[in-house]
Each structure stands twice: as C-alpha cells, then as structure tokens.
Amino acid sequence: PPGTILENGTCKLIQQIDTVCPSGFVEEGNRCVQYLPANKICPPGFNLSGQQCMAPESAELESTCPPNSIFENGKCKVIKNIDMVCPPGYTDSGDDCVLYVAPAKECPPNFILQGLQCIQTSSAPTQPVCPPGTVLQDNACISV
C-alpha cells in the first residue's frame, strides 16, 4: 500500500512515535522534566525567616532537593525517561512504531488470482477444424 516499504516479503509502514510525559512533567529534548520548589534548610542554630536564615549572626541559605533530582536555576529538576507509546496495532521497534501488513495480491489485466498465482484468462471464438480432404461449409465438414 502507499507509504509502505517492502522488507523481507512484508510491507512495513513506519510512523513517528508519539512521546508522552507523565502528568506534571514537560518534555525537554528527549526527556521528561518536572520542576519542584527547593526545600529551604538553615544550618544548625539558625531559623528560616522568609528567604533568610536568622540567628545571632546571619548565614547563607542552603537549598536541597529530593532524591533523583538536581538543583538548577533555583529549582529542583526531576528527570524521567519519555514513555514511548505506539498507536494500536503498531509494534515498538525501539525508535519507530512499525505496522506490518501483508503485501497486496494483485494481478495484471486479463489475469486472475488463484491462490498465490496469477492465471491468464482469455476468450476467443471457437471454430471447428475439418480433417484433411474436407472443407467447412455451413458448420459441417464436406469432402472435396
């Protein structure tokens, strides 16, 4: 069929894989990314007050992220692999979704398909043949 390629006797239709990220994630390149607010933690002996750690002396605010995430641009970045989802009937071949269909069996004009073969069909008017020494006259063979 149109849009397919023949490979090892099978027609192969290749379709782009749809990428689906889990809820709350966005696609960046070939990955799903989720941004979370960083946990604000003050060093021992200090208390968090707004965006600062307060104590008898001030200290630098530290940001930590949950496991499996990294701190980037003031936020925690969680990275997950993109789930590849193929349409129904397609097979995931790693990078592509592939639909395998049997090749169409078509015969050229004046041929008919019988099993796996194309048989030529033709029709011609039949004409009687007379034996030697006779001629055809009014659909009968007459001796000469």
Image (cartoon, rainbow, N blue to C red):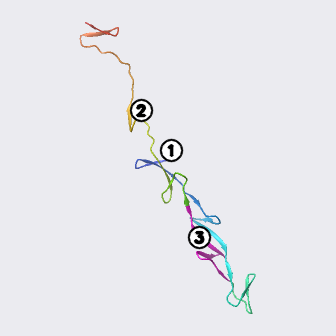
- CA distance for labels 3 and 2: 59 Å
- Element under disc 3: strand
Q: Earlier in the sequence, mark 1 or mark 2?
A: 1
Tell me the kind of residue under disc 3: Ile
Mark 1 closeness class: few <14, some 14–19, many ≥20 residues within 10 Å: few
Q: Earlier in the sequence, mark 3 or mark 2?
A: 3
Q: Main SS of the magenta segment?
A: strand
Residue 26 in which image quadrant: bottom right
Q: In the rendered view, would you say 17 is above or below 129?
A: below
Q: Which residue is denoted by mark 1 in the rendering?
A: 2
Instruction: Say which of marks 1 and 3 sits in front.
Output: 3
Q: Which residue is denoted by mark 3 in the rendering?
A: 79
122 displayed left or right of 61: left
- CA distance for labels 1 and 2: 22 Å
- CA distance for labels 1 and 3: 39 Å
Q: Where does the image place residue 19, in percent across and percent down from the top left?
A: 58, 60
Label at residue 112 = 2
Give the residues in magenta. Answer: 62-83
* The C terminus sits in image quarter: top left
Determine contact: label 3, label 2, CB under 8 Å.
no
Mark 3 closeness class: few <14, some 14–19, many ≥20 residues within 10 Å: some
Instruction: Say which of marks 1 and 2 sits in front.
Output: 2
Residue 137 in which image quadrant: top left
The residue sitting at 41% across, 32% down in the picture is 112
